[in-house]
Amino acid sequence: MNEALSYVHPSPASAWDTYLSQVDRVAPYLGPLARWVETLKRPKRALIVDVPIEMDDGSIAHFEGYRVQHSLSRGPGKGGVRFHPNVTLEEVMALAAWMTVKCAAVNLPFGGAKGGIRLDPKKLSIKELERVTRRYTSEIGLVIGPHSDILAPDVNTNPQIMAWIMDTYSMNTGSTATGVVTGKPVYLGGSLGRVKATGRGVFACGREAARRLGLNLQGARVAVQGFGNVGSVAAELFAQHGASIVAVQDHTGTIHNPKGLDMPKLLEYVQTSAEHGVAGFAQAERMADEDFWGVACDILVPAALEGQVTAARAQKIRARLVLEGANGPTVPEADDVLQERGVLVVPDVICNAGGVTVSYFEWVQDFSSFFWTEDEINQRLEQIMMNALSQIWNKADQHKITLRTATYAVSCERILTARQARGLYP
């Protein structure tokens, strides 16, 4: 069972509604560019495809797939593809829009895109999964490419699936095109450091935010929701820098140890447990999932799915700092609650931008066929993210606004300046 499958969305508001609310909040800070703001509220292109495959038993199954390009004003589309039974067009639209904002926040030459197929990959064999991936790639092949729209892993997708996408696209176009995807295996043109990049970026933003708050990481208490590539890597790095990971929640349940979890042993347990989850870890106590939100901690890292931090849960949070490792984990009403309570939120569109930043590095390396060391990757990643966060923080201080609104102000100014300069054709 995959970590993402069991999280429920407690809020009726859709991810797209959340995004639109965030755009509305930034409009007053866009000046003359506000005349273009409606372009942020409409995806440039949304493709819905039927994905029929022959199952192992000989039957024919149909799955619905999507690829949304929200904005291409600053460059080709960039964004992952997720396999999940709850994928909808509206969700993919929101994720694509957040990618537009995220790429602009760290000043990458990309627009935003996203894809998905509505299916439960755990119910498919490996060959069925390959067939559905290849068929989906062929169906969306008319809108993707190294110079038009670059795919990447997301929920329930991985380097192997990226390899199938790259191979299918390459076979259909007649030449090897490694740049059509990022997050692929290193031996097929993937980048060192990509797997841990998002979690590393979350930690880097958290370290800087803690410094500005006067919060010492040594002994700081951290609670993490989601223990995949993002949550586990961030937790590991916090622990390595002296913090105590006091609570972790994933698809199998919630564990708690106020004295701090032994991260090396927990990581080993998750990798070897039957369900590959944290439940059952001997050096911790089980607790009710909803009680996770009230755990005594200094730093909270929601790194699962969108819509997890509701207004009701925001009232329970005892952390001073929230680091959004997931996309869209906090609904607008919860943002207001956290602001009123003096809780600092480092928003997803900067906090988890480490993944797309190293994806950009991978894309550049593929075109040049020259590859950097992992130390070079990590150094460049931290430099870009810290520069971006500094500009955003300055904007927040200048206008006395939240970091989320400041991030949108910086990003949307870049996006709409490009839109205005390019004009309308024809």
Image: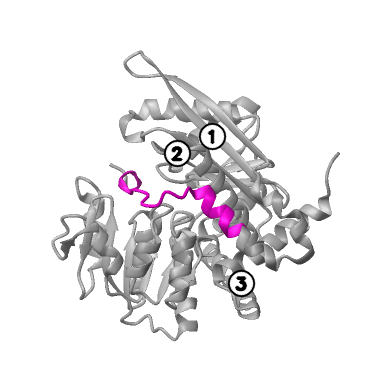
As measured in the structure, the alpha-carbon distance from the residue carrying label 1 to the one carrying label 2 is: 9 Å
Q: Are marks 1 and 2 in contact (CB under 8 Å)?
A: yes
The residue labelled by disc 2 is 87
Q: Amino acid at mark 3?
A: Ile
The residue labelled by disc 3 is 392
- The numbered mark, 1 or 2, whose residue comes first in the sequence reads 1
Q: Which residues are magenta?
A: 3-23
- The prevailing secondary structure element of the residues shown in magenta is helix
Q: Residue at x 21, y 62 (%)?
A: 255
Q: Could you tell whether 170 is left or right of 61 in the image?
A: right
Task: Let me know if residue 234 is in the magenta part.
Answer: no
Residue 362 visible (yes or no): no
The residue labelled by disc 1 is 66
Q: Residues within 10 Å of mark 3 (few under 14, many from 20)?
A: many
Could you say where residue 312 lies in the image, as x and y percent from the top left?
35, 63
Secondary structure at badge 1 equals strand
Task: Let me know if residue 22 is in the magenta part.
Answer: yes
Q: Which residue occupies the foreground of this view, 414 or 387?
A: 414
Could you say where residue 271 lies in the image, as x and y percent from the top left?
26, 52
Q: Residues within 10 Å of mark 2 (few under 14, many from 20)?
A: some
